[in-house]
Image (cartoon, rainbow, N blue to C red):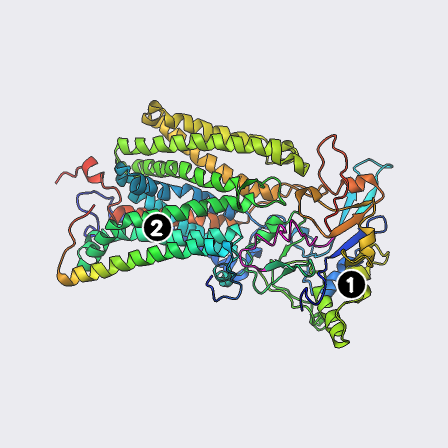
Amino acid sequence: MIPTSFEWIWDMGHIVFMGGLWYALTILGIGMTYCIVKAAIDTLKGDDGGHHN
Amino acid sequence: MTQEHRKAKKFGMVIDLDKCTGCGSCMVACMAENNVPFRENETDKLKSITWMRVYKLTNGKPYPKEEICYLPRPCMHCEGHKGHSPCVTVCPAIATDYDMDTGIVSQIPTRCFGCRYCMAACPYHARYFNWWDPVWPEGMEKSLSPNVSPRMRGVVEKCTFCFHRYQLALDKAYAEERRELEEHEYQTSCTQACPSDAITFGDLLNKNHAVYKLKKSTNAFRLLEKLGTNPKIYYLSSREWVRRAGDNYRPGEGTGKIKSHH
Amino acid sequence: MDSALIPEGVKRCPFPRFLTGLAVVGAVLLWGVFAMLLCWLKGLNQTNMNDSYGFALWIWADLAIIALGGGAFFTGFLKYIVGKDELKNIINFAVLIGFICYSSALLILAIDIGQPLRGWHIFWHANVHSMLTEVAFCLSCYFGVLTIEYIPLILENRQIDKIPFFHNLGHNMHEVMAVFAATGAFLSFFHQGSLGGVAGVLFGRPFAYREGLLVWPWTFFLFTWSAAAYGPSFTIFLTKLLEKVSGKKLVKDNVIDLLAKISGWMILTYTIAKIIDTWYWIKYTLPGTGFRLMDFYDDNMLYGLWILVAEIVVGGIFPALILITKKGRSTSSLLWTAVILACIGVCINRWVMVLQVMAVPVLTFEEWALYFPSWQEIATTILPVAYGIILVMISYRYLPIFPQEKELNPVES
């Protein structure tokens, strides 16, 4: 799963497959971090964030 | 100790079906050698673990023209195309592997988590699932082989060509400062147990091994060759209907000639 | 009693009736949980699976609910990527169904493996060449996406929304939802496909094996396509069912019409692709294996040629033809017929690609392998249905799942 695990090989299969996986996880991680941090900042500022549907 | 020291092998078997009497010694020897578990009630054969299984084939004709043939079926140790055997590539956790040095398809029970995808992939039903934890009759655990770990519930197991015997033979050879084994030094338990000498085991690439010559017989065939599984078990039979039973044929299609992959 | 939790401006059934409903479905759920615990504690010997039938009833259920849950990713894809804005009125429900389907699928997989405590091996010791690895990774990641998509909905509950942090969090998540939806669509294309690949790569099983493109057999593409096609039909089916149960109109006709039309055209194109695939397989793939088509449909109790006809004609062509016509979509009985046939069609496809693959003998001296599931398997397979009903009940009662409900059902005050 990660390059330090012993069965890891730097071949096309691992690069494409794990590359795609970590790419997706990174987007999700950054996205959620952004949402949580911004919500905390907005709350501290007393901003109600507006209405949404 | 890899190819640079030793030539790569392709261990395989030739089973002469004309000699097989269906006695089942190979099955018993295999179970004893490999600590294969069994249950008190073994009537449900779809849940029995038999790394080596003897099938009974008939020519489908009524008596007195009926003929019977017994066919022992271990794991075929398929090579597929360049080691792409049906079961190895599908395993999600690399719990089974095709060894390029020996041609043996291994199984790592401690890594297997029991998804059974390899069983779905194997057309020979050579892979078995441990539906229960192994329970040995009292006292019998003392007679278990110390060279093979018993497997736990929930994992897949199968014939390993008695790989532990290969390792023991290699250890002995190294101690004697040899790099290569003699043909007789590594034999599977089923081969040695067969009273009618129907099973021959050896390196399919080694011209000095009996299997090398036997596999070239015009009576030789393998199971389901057409699927491209490229098995390392060859069968011999002088009877056309037996050879034809080895594969599927469309109406009017002649029995194919053996394709030599090994 | 719980009126403070119910969204403003909508009417819900009395609390005791709601609790009674929960108790009835909850009893079924407990039965399923008991069976699940038996499988975990005593092992898979609790099932009737065997060495010929290593994949069985619940794996079919797993594949079927993932296909049916495909409405979530495809509706998300249509709304956020293609820009079909009307679908915002049904996307919440599609996400909820997707969440239920995928959480159930993961649970089933956790029950199905022989050594559940070693489940992490599939991630840590991943074999990147196995279709099942791809399934496990994409399924888990996409479940993460669905959770992210479901959270803002929970945050919209009247009481939770009053807390400023949660209100802001929900607002922010809505704003970047397109990014999550795009990631979800990316993951879905792969895991739906790799589920098809699971059967398609089995070259030892001529009934399943398909040629393909690069490392992907044709079933890879067919599964993604069919999930995108049939998933929205399931979303429509459940919306209509919920409307029947609640006695209220929840989504405007133009929204249903749009989703039904897209589903119809997708099913039609998928069915054409499936017919071409089947023809190519019969004409070019099978002859080399020594099998004839009828070898897979003869000499057994269950699998006749009818199943192929049921899948392609009854579950493919029929619903497609109804859904692509304006009259079919606007006539209630026809729409109902079409979405039900569609759901049956995709379920038959998944059944065939799992169970018939196992049943067909490949060695010439073997028989068809047929099996009947144990009660533990049946209970464990019903478990996700009960769980799904409970989650829909709770979500519908306390969350604003249908944005048009208030407008369609004004409450007199």
Q: Secondary structure at mark 2?
A: helix
In this rendering, the label closer to the viewer, 1 or 2: 1
Q: Secondary structure at mark 1?
A: loop
Type of residue at label 1?
Answer: Gln
Q: Circle 1 sits on which residue?
A: B187
List x then y, in percent, for residue C315: 47, 31
The subunit carrying tag 1 is B
List x then y, in percent, for residue C17: 28, 46
In this rendering, does residue A32 appear at all? yes
| Prevailing secondary structure of the magenta residues | loop
Q: Circle 2 sits on which residue?
A: C146
**As displayed, is residue C184 above or below residue C164?**
above
Report the residue that reaches farthest toward the bottom. B175
List x then y, in percent, for residue C100: 38, 48
Type of residue at label 2?
Answer: Leu
* Residues tagged by mark 1 and mark 2 found on one chain of the structure: no
User: In the drawing, what numbered circle is on residue A45?
Assistant: none
User: Callout 2: few (<14), some (14-19), or many (20+) C-alpha neighbours within 10 Å?
Assistant: many
Look at the image and give the residue range highlighted in magenta: B71-95
Decide which of C104, A21 is in the foreground and name it: A21
Residue depicted at 25% across the width and 48% down the height: C399
Residue depicted at 62% across the width and 64% down the height: B151
The subunit carrying tag 2 is C
